[in-house]
Image (cartoon, rainbow, N blue to C red):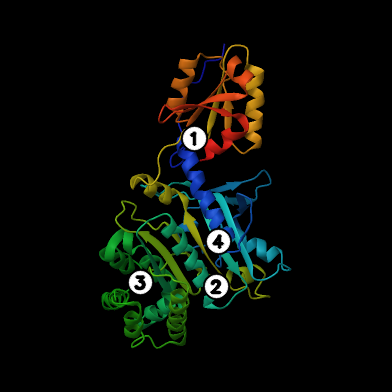
């Protein structure tokens, strides 16, 4: 006789199950994002969870030196091909555009799917999480970046958060790094700078020292990215010592971006020269959203311009300017829970029909009519008594009970109870949807 194997039933580290009380409000967030993206003229895209590893780790993708590349979940199929789970939605989208060269431009897409990163876990950070991306391909103008930022402003204003949209430009950052004396090590410096909020100035300094950078140059670099002031003041100050053509172009692009954003009514945009974003594919403006007065200290959305990635997948045969941003569903939802902006909801049911006596067929007919009118409707499946059904409705938070008995069927009017107030009214079946929706 085989010995039974004992094991503890538990989830893998960094992943979660979502019961209805968590899934329903999360779904509402995603529905709001979807509606916003389509309001701005974006269409949906879906890509596979599994990608070729060389696609994910390409220099014009994550970049082999990136911390994100080190966090890819890797696997091998039965043909011994190296594969990986996607770590974001930008690289797969770039692959799709490269494989479909006849797409009409601009290509404006949004995408909502899970991604995976084998990285550290903390509040708002998990190893499996959903991303919601919105991107514009085919537009060189900063107008496209401004439209992406205006979506960020629209979404977090609608969610009633206090927030700031931080922006920088990789071209300007490269100019600052070259000014500090690190022309040949810009990406290594950017990856370290990207950790400034996590490990602090001393941590970045120590990391740069370990990479072989000198103390005077490190101080020069850190002082340069620490410039404060209004957006215009910061750009005026940095323009005095950034002399490379690339750096000057970055300053010019940021000035254009600010001007377009002001025309679009964006009021929360702030230039932050320490903003780096550690992925190698960024080529111009980068931006992130941070919530103010929240325990969620990581960014809740981030992105930027990546003009070379798609073209590089095609061997540099064609240029595809692109920009976009990714919304972090996990930190957004955690922030909404912490701020009391969302309440646990156990069901989507709006009306629960309780058949009395032998009137189950009439209850089922009423259920069908209400569903035809767009009311989320349940009928008692357990053959419970009235009191037990009402207890169930209270525990689930279902707002309305409808009783279907002989008298109701004969009169053509049904007793509708508001579970919150306890008030009962007899209402004709065709008028019930209006009462519930109201």
Residue 144 disc label: 2
User: Eyeballing the image, is 5 above or below 241?
Assistant: above
Residue plotted at (57% across, 60% down)? 39
Question: How far separated are the C-alphas under marks 2 and 1?
Answer: 37 Å
Q: Quadrant of residue 408?
A: top right
Q: Earlier in the sequence, mark 3 or mark 4?
A: 4
Q: Earlier in the sequence, mark 3 or mark 2?
A: 2
Q: Of tags 3 and 1, which is closer to the observer?
A: 1
Give the structural element (helix, strand or loop) at label 2.
helix
User: Eyeballing the image, is 241 above or below 133?
Assistant: below
Question: How far separated are the C-alphas under marks 3 and 4?
Answer: 22 Å
User: Eyeballing the image, is 364 above or below 357?
Assistant: below
The x, y position of residue 34, in whole percent, is 56, 54
Q: Quadrant of the N terminus?
A: top right
Question: How far separated are the C-alphas under marks 3 and 2?
Answer: 20 Å
Q: Are marks 3 and 2 in contact (CB under 8 Å)?
A: no
Give the structural element (helix, strand or loop) at label 3.
loop
Question: How far separated are the C-alphas under marks 4 and 1?
Answer: 27 Å
The x, y position of residue 322, in whole percent, is 57, 70
């Amino acid at each position: 006789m085989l010995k039974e194997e004992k094991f503890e039933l538990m989830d893998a580290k960094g992943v979660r199950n979502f019961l209805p009380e968590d899934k329903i409000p999360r779904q509402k967030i995603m529905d709001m994002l979807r509606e916003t993206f389509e309001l701005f003229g974006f269409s949906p895209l879906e890509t596979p969870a599994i990608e070729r590893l060389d696609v994910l780790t390409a220099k014009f993708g994550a970049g082999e030196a990136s911390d994100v590349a080190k966090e890819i979940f890797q696997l091998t199929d039965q043909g011994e091909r190296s594969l990986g789970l996607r770590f974001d939605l930008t690289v797969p989208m770039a692959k799709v555009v490269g494989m479909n060269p006849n797409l009409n431009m601009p290509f404006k897409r949004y995408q909502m799917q899970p991604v995976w990163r084998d990285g550290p876990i903390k509040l708002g950070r998990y190893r499996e999480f959903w991303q919601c991306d919105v991107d514009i391909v085919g537009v060189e103008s900063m107008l496209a970046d401004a439209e992406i930022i205006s979506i960020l402003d629209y979404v977090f204003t609608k969610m009633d958060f206090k927030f700031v949209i931080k922006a920088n430009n990789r071209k300007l950052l490269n100019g600052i790094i070259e000014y500090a004396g690190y022309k040949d090590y810009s990406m290594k410096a950017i990856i370290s700078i990207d950790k400034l909020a996590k490990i602090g100035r001393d941590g970045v300094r120590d990391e740069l020292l370990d990479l072989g950078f000198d103390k005077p140059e490190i101080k020069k670099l850190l002082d340069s990215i620490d410039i404060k002031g209004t957006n215009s003041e910061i750009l005026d100050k940095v323009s005095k010592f950034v002399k490379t053509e690339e750096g000057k172009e970055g300053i010019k692009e940021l000035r254009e971006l600010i001007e377009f954003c002001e025309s679009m009514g964006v009021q929360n945009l702030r230039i932050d020269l320490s903003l780096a974003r550690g992925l190698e594919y960024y080529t111009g403006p980068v931006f992130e959203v941070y919530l103010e007065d929240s325990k969620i200290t990581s960014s809740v959305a981030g992105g930027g311009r990546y003009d070379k990635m798609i073209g590089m997948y095609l061997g540099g045969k064609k240029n595809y300017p692109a920009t976009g941003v990714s919304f972090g569903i996990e930190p957004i939802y955690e922030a909404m829970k912490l701020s009391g902006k969302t309440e646990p909801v156990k069901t989507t049911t709006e009306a629960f029909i309780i058949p009395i006596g032998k009137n189950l067929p009439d209850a089922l007919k009423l259920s069908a009519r209400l569903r035809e009118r767009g009311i989320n409707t349940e009928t008692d499946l357990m053959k419970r008594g009235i009191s037990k059904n009402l207890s169930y409705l209270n525990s689930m938070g279902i707002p309305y009970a409808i009783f279907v008995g002989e008298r109701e069927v004969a009169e053509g009017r049904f007793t509708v109870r508001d579970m919150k107030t306890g008030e009962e009214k007899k209402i004709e079946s065709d008028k019930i949807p209006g009462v519930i929706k109201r």
